[in-house]
Amino acid sequence: MAQALQQIAAIAWSVAAISVIAVTLQGCGGDVPHTTLTTTLACEIGRIPWPNEGCQTIEELSEEADTFLRSHMPPWDVDNAQTLEEGILGPTLNVSLTARDLLPWAENIPKDIWLNYVLPYANVNEPRVDWRTLLSSELRPLVQNPTYQANTTSDVVSVLNEKLWSTLRTPEITFKSGQTPLIYDPMSTIDYGYASCTGISIMLVDALRSVGVPARIAGTPAWSANVSKGNHNWVEVWLGPGEGLDGGAWTFIEGKPAGGGETLTNPCDKWFCNPSHFDGKTQAFAPQFDNTTNTTIYPMAWDLENENVPGVNRTAFYNAVCKPCGNNTVTIQV
C-alpha cells in the first residue's frame, strides 16, 4: 500500500509539473511520467544516463542499487535484513530512482556518488525508518512547483535549508544541544521538534537525498583530539568536480537551526571553521555506505567503540579551508 501511494503521489506531482513547463521529456519509462529538464545526457526512453558511463535501463539500475544496499549493510542491518526489506528497501529504491529520473540537478551525478550519498537509507547508526517517502512528498514541491523551478544543487540546498524546518513541523524544528543518541533520526526530530547538531545534520542530509542531492554528514568526535573540548557534526554537499571548496567537489553547511545565515561558498561563515578548531590536532571525518573502498571509519562521538561505519578522513580539506579564517572558540555538542 505504501509503495502504491508513493507512486500515485509521484505521478500526480509529475503531471502538475508537465502542465506548467514545456520540456523535452526523457527518463526511465515505466509508470511514472518524466520531467527531466536537461538534455545534456540523452538516453532512450526507459534508460538512465550516467556521466562517463552511458545509459542504463531502470531495471538494471534497480537491481544494482538493491545489491549495493544489501552488500554494504552494517552488521546490525544484516541481522535485521528481513525487516528492512519489508519496510524500507522498497520505498528507498522507488523514491531514489524517481528523483534520479525526474529532477534536473540529479542528472550529472556519477554513479558512485549516487550509490553512496543519495541512495542509502541511513547515515550512521540512527534508528531505521522510512523517512524518504515522507520527506520526498513534503519537500519536493518546495523546489519543483508551478511557480518555482530549482535548476541547480545550490538552489535546492538554499530553499530546503530555509524552509524544511517549518514545512515538516509547526512550531518549526529547533536546535537543542546534547540530544544524541536519544533524538537523531528524522522521525524523532520531527516528533520532538528539536535535535542537537547530529540530528539536525541528519535531517538536512536526508532531506537533500530525498530530492536527489548527494549529501553526507561530517564532523569531529573531539576538538583538538580532546573530548572535553566538545564535538560537532555538520553537512557536506556534493556540487561536482571543481564546483566545491578548495577546488574539490564538496562544500559544507549546517542545518539552519544550528547555523543560520551560512552559505555554500564561504567556509569562514561557519562558527567552527577557523584555526582555533582546526589546529593540527582536530580530525574530521565523513561516513560512506560502501564498506570496501573506505579509507577509515567514521568515529561517532556518542558510540566511539563502534567501528562499523565506513568513512573518509576529511582533515586535510578542513585544514586547508578553515585555517585562513578568523578564530572562534564556541563549542556545540552532538
Image (spheres, rainbow, N blue to C red):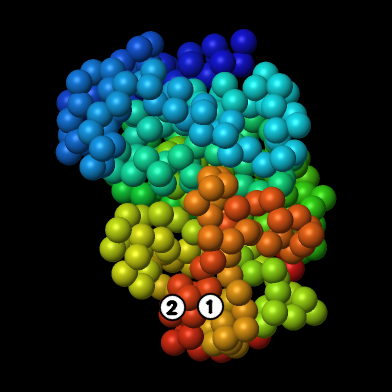
Q: For the residue carrying disc 1, how many other residues have a C-alpha within 10 Å: few (<14), some (14-19), or many (20+)? A: many
The residue that appears at 48% across and 85% down in the rendered structure is 323
What mark, if any, has residue 321 been given in the picture?
2
Q: Secondary structure at mark 1?
A: loop
Quadrant for residue 35, please give it: top left
Q: Is residue 308 above or below residue 83?
A: below
What mark, if any, has residue 133 been given in the picture?
none
Q: Earlier in the sequence, mark 1 or mark 2?
A: 1
The quadrant of the picture occupied by the N terminus is top right
> Are the residues at dot 1 and dot 2 in contact (C-beta closer than 8 Å)?
yes
What mark, if any, has residue 273 been given in the picture?
1
Please identify the residue farthest to the front as the structure is shown: 292
Q: Is residue 74 left or right of residue 160?
A: right
**Residue 328: % across, % down:** 60, 85
Q: How many marks?
A: 2
Q: For the residue carrying disc 2, how many other residues have a C-alpha within 10 Å: few (<14), some (14-19), or many (20+)? A: some
The residue that appears at 50% across and 37% down in the rendered structure is 119
Please identify the residue farthest to the right as the structure is shown: 182
Q: Is residue 232 left or right of residue 119?
A: right
Which of discs 1 and 2 lies nearer the camera? The answer is: 2
The residue that appears at 49% across and 80% down in the rendered structure is 319
Q: Amino acid at mark 1?
A: Cys
**Residue 34: % across, % down:** 30, 22
Q: Is residue 170 left or right of residue 302?
A: left
**Residue 107: % across, % down:** 30, 38
Q: Is residue 266 visible?
A: yes
Q: Amino acid at mark 2?
A: Val
Question: Alpha-carbon distance for marks 1 and 2?
Answer: 8 Å
Instruction: Name the foreground residue: 240 vs 313.
Output: 313
Q: Is residue 85 above or below residue 49?
A: above
Instruction: Name the foreground residue: 6 vs 280.
Output: 280
